Amino acid sequence: MSGPTVAIWKFASCDGCQLTVLDCEDELLAIAAALDIRMFLEAGPAQMLDHYDISLVEGSITTAHDVERIRDVRARSGLLITLGACATAGGIQALRNTADIDACRSNVYARPEWLDTLATSTPIAAHVQVDHELRGCPIAKTELLATITALLAQRRMPISAYSVCVECKLAGNPCVLVAHGTACLGPVTHAGCAALCPSLGRGCFGCFGPSESVNLDGLRSAFGEIDVSDDVLVHLLRTFNTEAPEFSEASNRYRAAGPEGTTRRDP
Amino acid sequence: MSSDAVILDPRSGMQALIDALDTAGYRVLGPVLRDGVIVYDDVVSESAMPTGVRVEQGAGRWRVFQDARPERFSWTPGADSWKRFVFPARSEVLRIRRTDGSWTTGQPAAPDRPLALLGARDCEVRALGVLDTVMLGPNHPDARYAQRRADAFVVAVTCGEPSSTCWCTSMGGGPQPHDGFDLRITELSDHAGHRLLVQPGSDRGEQIMAVLPGSDAHNADIDSAAHVVQRSVDRLPVRLPGAELPALLAGSELHPHWDDVAARCLSCSNCTMVCPTCFCSSFSDHTSLDNDEAFRTQEWASCFQLDHSYLGGRPVRATTAQRYRQWLTHKLQTWTAQMGTTGCVGCGRCTTWCPAGIDIIEEARAVIGSQMVAARLQPVDVYVHPR
Amino acid sequence: MQIVPYRVVSRVVVGPATVTLGLVPVAQACVTAAPGQFMMVWCFGIGEIPISVSGIVNGGVIEITVRAVGATSAAIVDAGVADVLGMRGPYGTAWPMGAVVGRDVIVMAGGLGLAPLRLAIESMVSGRAGQRSLTLLIGAREPAQVLYAEQLPAWRSAGADVRVTVDVGDSAWHGPVGTATAVFERMSVRADVAFVCGPEMMMVSAAQALVRAGMSPAQVFVSMERNMHCGIGHCGRCQLGPLMLCRDGAVVPWEMVSELVQVSGR
């Protein structure tokens, strides 16, 4: 083993981003040769070192213990890079932030008093300094590899902060919004997924969070032209990146503007 | 009789054309209806090409309709353009391997087969000409682009069914291509039946035409083609004074209307990505995991992306208003001084494929003074699908 | 697109995180560059940035002066003698040396902006350019950041009127404090031709002051910068209105850009 020492940490999350690391099947041997991975419980290594050159952090902060642990991780880390929607925006579990946590707890768990949780799910950057973020639910393998190779070459880590529409057009996809009248968050969503959902004829769910230049009021008007209701838009915004500031501000405003509906139309 | 034009059967003749191009060594690309849009892709059989397809286009709206009618070219182009084939959306331009103390450079392989572009409209033929002025500039011509363009066999098509978003006649074009093609097809459908009039535009075109199983065209066919052109021209009102736009837009930089557009613009880059003349790109460096090999890719980029104008770590054009202004004024104003051609061919893609339905014509009118242009506005008679 | 390997043959620290590197092609013949032109300089796998040629010495060693501000420039500054960097070029327009013949010339530089002017200045102080007189106004943030300080005496003894001003002085500083433009406005120097290079704000204020002092906007030349990303006019990123600065610049007459730079976000 050689190269920088690496730790991969998990906080509140589904492990999908860590699995994306393991999903780099063709590159795994080269990754293992280039990085000295010392901590990656999902895959086996569990060496607690005082210092790791690079920490990759999956998941959001949802407990008091998490708050302590992320500070400890930060103190042990050279570069701290967060992986995925949970770590960068609180994830799906941040839906609790606008709900009654006690009601959630007693609805879900038979013995809610055994559960020790915070009322909110917050991104890693709300607690410690983060050096780089990989978006997505889960992250894209291509972006992970681009980040690792950039780190190894000491190149600036790439960020595709423009919209998913760019990736759709690069791929030659038909625009599902314009040609099919399908609700799609692509125009306001950060690229990186290679337009996965629109490539399969589905609207973008926004799992990479807000792009560098978000105009949700403009998208809302566009949705109006194809008869997509505020309900659908709010549901789309309140999914993977519900607490991303641009998404949360707009969804709260649109929800306040009209009564909450009960139906959900798939995008 | 007209020996420099032939009449082809719309089905068997089209197949013969595809076969002749294939035999001549071309990779034949043509229109295909897929997932509700017209895209350009490899065609081996004429049956893969649209028949009886009509499209309804509007600002932010595209719908396709198919019926039993036999027409082959009753549609207008979709988001896809031939740019994708002569200037690929992503390509590797350089590969460098570290050697002892220095490095060795590898160049990407040249494309294996020359391209035949079957079905290019006048706006698309002109768009290729505009791209040529950018990519083949005198100082640093792009060798791979030059090769693809020099080899490309262009089968142009006269537009018989313009869309409401078409405005080629405002930008120096029209329904019928006059140059820049090897063969030109005009689809005829009158009392004499449904047929394709094929005319050559080059020696290469004449050679291919010579092997097609067509009959010589008659003067009546030529007259019928002129009628098709005139009917389309009547449906293509001049919507902006193209040649005057650089002068009209001069001094519009501080117009408050840019902020009005910015409230609607999603800054999503769709207009630029579908534009057949937009050439902005980004070059990026990558490395292998062992860090011994570096490669550089070129990818379509957009002036709506923040890093497009990065200078000293910050975007020069930080706001959507600034970026939209850059795009519109580049297309309709500054391009002329920069490249010696107009930057816009009036194909209407940016309007159709804007999710927010922003119409470049309306925005241009707003900043250059609506009264002056409104007088030129004529009603538009285009295909609207019966409901 | 070809990147040519160049070997670093000299490295001189010329300021904080700032070095001048001398480079020669590893295998190919040397290229020459006109004063004011730039090269695209590449560091293996890290990236490529535009850097003006600041000198050509010993029959073809290309000198570049670089300050570490991002990943690529930091890697270039870190390059040692015998390391290999890549270069393409030269690209862009040059200072119009023909315009200085028999004329009174003023050169104004801000910070690193002295680097793209150095070849032009050397051509003038060596007597090759044939100007009647040369006034050189150099502005720097602080005394330690005055580029090529060791060369200034030679330029002075060759007849140039060289004045240096800093934004912030120190205890050893006895020269003027303030911008180069302010120094110019206190002088009663007359010039026919001006070359100006520095941050855009500095160039705008200097060019405006020169024109106010009676110079023709066609005889004031500035070195404009936008995102020079490919250097060959293909990527579209260095546009400034009708200009593509990697092709039509960087050196342009002030009359060509004086209105363009008045609109923010262009």
Image (spheres, coloured by chain):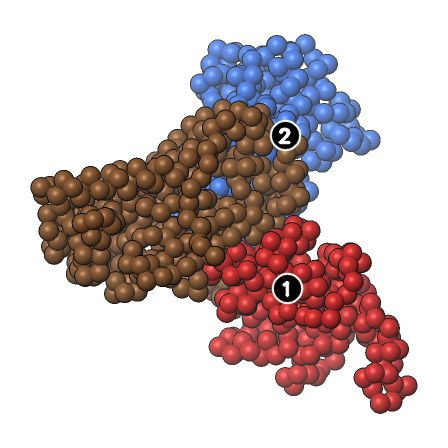
Nearest the viewer among B35 and A124 is B35
Question: Which residue: 18% across, 49% down?
Answer: B192
Q: Is residue C201 above or below residue B324?
A: above
Q: Is residue A169 above or below residue C40?
A: below
Nearest the viewer among A190 and B315 is A190
Badge 2 is on which residue? B255
Spot the blue chain and give its letter.
C
Q: Is residue C248 left or right of residue A137?
A: left
- Give the CA separation, mark 2 to mark 1: 34 Å
Place of residue B25 in the rendered image (x, y in percent of width and height, measured from the top left): 20, 59
- Crowding near pointer 2: few (<14 within 10 Å), some, many (20+)? few
**Which image quadrant is residue A127 in?**
bottom right
- Does the CB distance between marks 2 and 1 fall below 8 Å? no
Nearest the viewer among B352 and B26 is B352
Place of residue A193 in the rendered image (x, y in percent of width and height, measured from the top left): 56, 65
**Which chain does tag 1 point to?**
A
Question: Which residue: 46% across, 47% down?
Answer: B349
| Amino acid on which disc 1 is placed | Gly
Question: Which residue: 69% across, 79% down?
Answer: A14
> Do marks 2 and 1 both belong to one polypeptide chain?
no
**Which chain does tag 2 point to?**
B
Which type of secondary structure does the marked residue at label 1 adopt?
loop
- Shade of chain A as shown in the rendered figure: red
Badge 1 is on which residue? A206
Q: Is residue A71 left or right of residue B74?
A: right
- Is any part of residue B361 visible from this angle? yes
- Shade of chain B as shown in the rendered figure: brown
| Amino acid on which disc 2 is placed | His
Place of residue B35 in the rendered image (x, y in percent of width and height, measured from the top left): 44, 65
**Which image quadrant is residue A97 in?**
bottom right
